[in-house]
Image: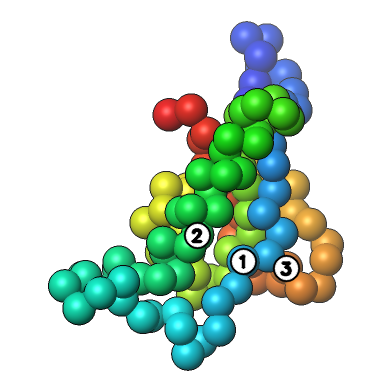
Amino acid sequence: MPQSEEGNEFQTSVPAVEIDYFAVDEEYRSLKLDEDSNRYETISKAFFLYMLEHIKKISIEQVGATHICLYAVPKAVHFYERCGFEPFEAYMNADELPFLENCIPMFYVINK
């Protein structure tokens, strides 16, 4: 947790938009964009990045958010990292919702 010059801990908050759910049917997750695509150039990633661009636009123009956050299931963490997200467990209060159990909080800075 951040500390002031006097050594006191303080809470910070960042204006953010949260992506609650993103899921692609297992049958389609690993489909490549075309036969020349590498294994990471998938329809899932293309769709997610397209969605992310729209979320960024709305976040900047209408919401005033500077970050996008989500909770990733452990096996999706690398997918989100390839899309520009970073883990931030150390800075986020744990959510008590049962469907988030074992999920990793991640964030994306909109204007890098």
Kindly identify which residue carries mark 1.
22
Disc 1: CA contacts within 10 A as few (<14), some (14-19) or many (>=20): few
Q: Tell me the mark number nearer the camera, choosing from 1 and 3.
A: 1
Badge 1 amino acid: Phe
Q: Are marks 2 and 1 in contact (CB under 8 Å)?
A: yes
Q: Is residue 78 above or below residue 94?
A: below
The residue carrying pointer 3 sits among few (fewer than 14), some (14 to 19) or many (20 or more) residues within 10 Å by Cα, namely some
Please provide percent x and percent y for residue 47: 48, 62
Query: What's the CA distance linking mark 2 and mark 3?
Result: 20 Å
Residue pictured at 21% horizontal, 70% vertical: 37
Q: Would you say the residues marked 1 and 3 are in contact, meaning their CB atoms lie under 8 Å apart?
A: no
Going by the picture, which residue comes out furthest to the left? 36
**Rendering coords of residue 11 (x, y %):** 75, 28
Q: Quadrant of the C terminus?
A: top left
Residue flagged by tag 2: what amino acid is it? Phe
Q: Residue at x 65, y 34 (%)?
A: 59
Would residue 73 be seen by someone viewing this image from the given angle?
yes
Colour mode of the rendering: rainbow
In the structure shown, which secondary structural element does the residue marked by tag 3 occupy?
helix
Q: In the rendering, at what x and y percent does residue 91 appear? A: 63, 41
Q: Measure the alpha-carbon separation of dots 1 and 3.
A: 13 Å
Residue that appears at 65% across and 36% down: 58
**Local SS, label 1:** loop
Q: Quadrant of the N terminus?
A: top right
Q: How many marks?
A: 3
Residue denoted by label 2: 48
Q: Is residue 87 visible?
A: no
Image coordinates for residue 81, horizontal then vertical, percent: 42, 55
Circle 3 residue: 100
User: Under tag 2, what secondary structure?
Assistant: helix
Q: In whole angstroms, how far apart are the C-alphas of marks 2 and 1? A: 8 Å
Where on the picture, by quarter, is residue 92? Answer: top right
